[in-house]
C-alpha cells in the first residue's frame, strides 16, 4: 500500500514538471519575440480641477490586439527628462481678427521652462515659412509671432504644411509637439474638387462648373498627416481660428476643417480646442489647459509584437486608476526584430 502511494506521488510530480516545462518555454518564446518601443503619453484627470495622480507601471495597461504587453518602465517627462521641442504653426489664411489672442501665445511661450525649445512658422503654399527655428530664448521666439497675412496662395493646405514640418524634423530623443492654429480647411483640395463639372443632362454641352461645391468629405491628406505624426512620434495639438474668403465663411467647409484637425490631434495623442465655428474669445484658458497636458506627460517604454515588416501597430493604452484617462497616439512604430537588435548594438 505504501509503495502504491509513493508511486502515485512520483507520478504527480512528473506530470506537474511535464506541464510546467511547456509553460516556461512559451513565456520565454513570447519574451524573445518582442521588441522595445516607446511613446509619449499624457495623464489626465476626468474631472476638471481634480488632482492628477502619478502614473506607475502597475497603473497602466497596454494591449496590442488581444496581447497584453509588458511595460518596462514609465518615465515622467520632468527634471532631466523634461526636454521638449514645441513648434507653433500658424495658418497664414487665418483672419487677422485673432490678433487679440496673439499676446496669449506670446505669454505662453515666455512661461515655458528652460528645457523647452520653441519654434515658430507660418503655413502657406502647402509648406511652411520658418519665422524662428527652435530656440531656448523664449523672448526671441515670442517676437517671431506676427499677425497672419490673411490672404490666399495658390496651394493652401494646412495638412501638407504639417506633413512638410514633420518629415523635415530631425529625430531626437525628446518630446516633439506641434500647436496648429488654423481653420483646417484644405483650400487646395477644395478648389480642385470645385473645378469638376456637374452634368445637368445627357450631353456634354450641359456640363457646368460648380465653383461653390468644394469638398464633400474630409481632405485625404488628413490621414497622411496623422500617419506621419504617429510614425515619427510627433504629438499635434490644435486651436481653431477663423479663415478668410468664402470657404472661411462656409459652415460645411469649416466643419470639415475642424474635423480634420481634430482627427489628427486625437490620433496623435494631442488636444483640440474650438468654440463652435467662432473665433475663441481668448486663447488663454485653452493654453492653460495645454500647459497642464505638457506638465503631465510620460515616456512609456514597453515590449511590442513586431510583424514581418516594420510599421505602425495599433495599441490601446489605458489607466487602471479610477477617474483617470491616458491620451496617447493610436499607433506606435514597431521595427522588425533584426532592426531592434541592430539598434541595441549601436
Image (cartoon, helix red, strand yellow):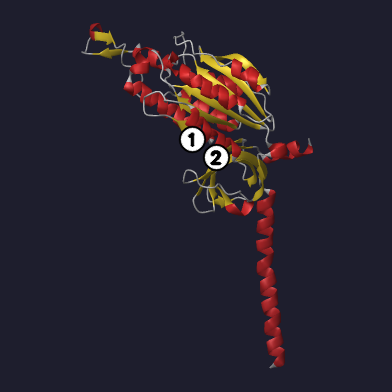
Q: Nearer the viewer, residue 199 or 121?
A: 121
Q: Is residue 204 above or below residue 293?
A: above
Q: Residue furthest left?
A: 201
Q: Residue at x 50, y 34 (%)?
A: 271
Would residue 280 be found to the left or right of residue 232 on screen? left
- Look at the image and tell me in which quarter the C terminus lies: top right
Q: Are marks 2 and 1 in contact (CB under 8 Å)?
A: no
Query: Where is 235 relative to 249, above or below?
Result: below
What secondary structure is marked by label 2?
loop
In the image, what residue occupies the spot 31% across and 11% down?
211
Res 258 visible = yes
Residue position marked by numbered label 2 in the rendering: 328
The residue furthest right is: 345
Q: Residues within 10 Å of mark 2 (few under 14, many from 20)?
A: many
Residue 162 shows up from this direction: no
Which callout, 2 or 1, points at the residue further toward the start of the chain? 1
Q: Quadrant of residue 242?
A: top left
Query: Is 251 left, or right, of 117 in this rendering?
Result: left
**Residue hosting label 1:** 266
SS assignment at label 1: helix
Quadrant where the image shows the N terminus: bottom right
Measured from the top left, where is residue 152 in percent x and y?
A: 44, 9
Amino acid at each position: 500500500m505504501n509503495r502504491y502511494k509513493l508511486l502515485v506521488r512520483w507520478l504527480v510530480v512528473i506530470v506537474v514538471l511535464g506541464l510546467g516545462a511547456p509553460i516556461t518555454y512559451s513565456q520565454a518564446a513570447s519574451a524573445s519575440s518582442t521588441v522595445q518601443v516607446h511613446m509619449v503619453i499624457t495623464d489626465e484627470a476626468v474631472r476638471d480641477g481634480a488632482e492628477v495622480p502619478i502614473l506607475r507601471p502597475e497603473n497602466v495597461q497596454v494591449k496590442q490586439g488581444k496581447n497584453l504587453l509588458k511595460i518596462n518602465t514609465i518615465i515622467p517627462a520632468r527634471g532631466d527628462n523634461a526636454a521638449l521641442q514645441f513648434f507653433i504653426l500658424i495658418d497664414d489664411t487665418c483672419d487677422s481678427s485673432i490678433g487679440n489672442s496673439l499676446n496669449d501665445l506670446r505669454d505662453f511661450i515666455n512661461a515655458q521652462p528652460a528645457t523647452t525649445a520653441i519654434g515658430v512658422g507660418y503655413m502657406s503654399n502647402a509648406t511652411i515659412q520658418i519665422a524662428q527655428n527652435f530656440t531656448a530664448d523664449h523672448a526671441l521666439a515670442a517676437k517671431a509671432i506676427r499677425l497672419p497675412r490673411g490672404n490666399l496662395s495658390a496651394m493652401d493646405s494646412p495638412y501638407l504644411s504639417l506633413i512638410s514640418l514633420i518629415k523635415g524634423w530631425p529625430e531626437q530623443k525628446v518630446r516633439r509637439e506641434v500647436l496648429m492654429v488654423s481653420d483646417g480647411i484644405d483650400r487646395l483640395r477644395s478648389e480642385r474638387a470645385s473645378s469638376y463639372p456637374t452634368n445637368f443632362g445627357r450631353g456634354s454641352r450641359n456640363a457646368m462648373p460648380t465653383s461653390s461645391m468644394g469638398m464633400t468629405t474630409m481632405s485625404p491628406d488628413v490621414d497622411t498627416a496623422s500617419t506621419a505624426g504617429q510614425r515619427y512620434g510627433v504629438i499635434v495639438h490644435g486651436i481653431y481660428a477663423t479663415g478668410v474668403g468664402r470657404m472661411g465663411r462656409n459652415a460645411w467647409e469649416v466643419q470639415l476643417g475642424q474635423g480634420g484637425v481634430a482627427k489628427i490631434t486625437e490620433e496623435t495623442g494631442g488636444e483640440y480646442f474650438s468654440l463652435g465655428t467662432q473665433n475663441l474669445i481668448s486663447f488663454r484658458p485653452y493654453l492653460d489647459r495645454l500647459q497642464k497636458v505638457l506638465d503631465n506627460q510620460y515616456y512609456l517604454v514597453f515590449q511590442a509584437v513586431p510583424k514581418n515588416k516594420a510599421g505602425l501597430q495599433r495599441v490601446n493604452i489605458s489607466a487602471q486608476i479610477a477617474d483617470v484617462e491616458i491620451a496617447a497616439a493610436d499607433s506606435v512604430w514597431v521595427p522588425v526584430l533584426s532592426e531592434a537588435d541592430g539598434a541595441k548594438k549601436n
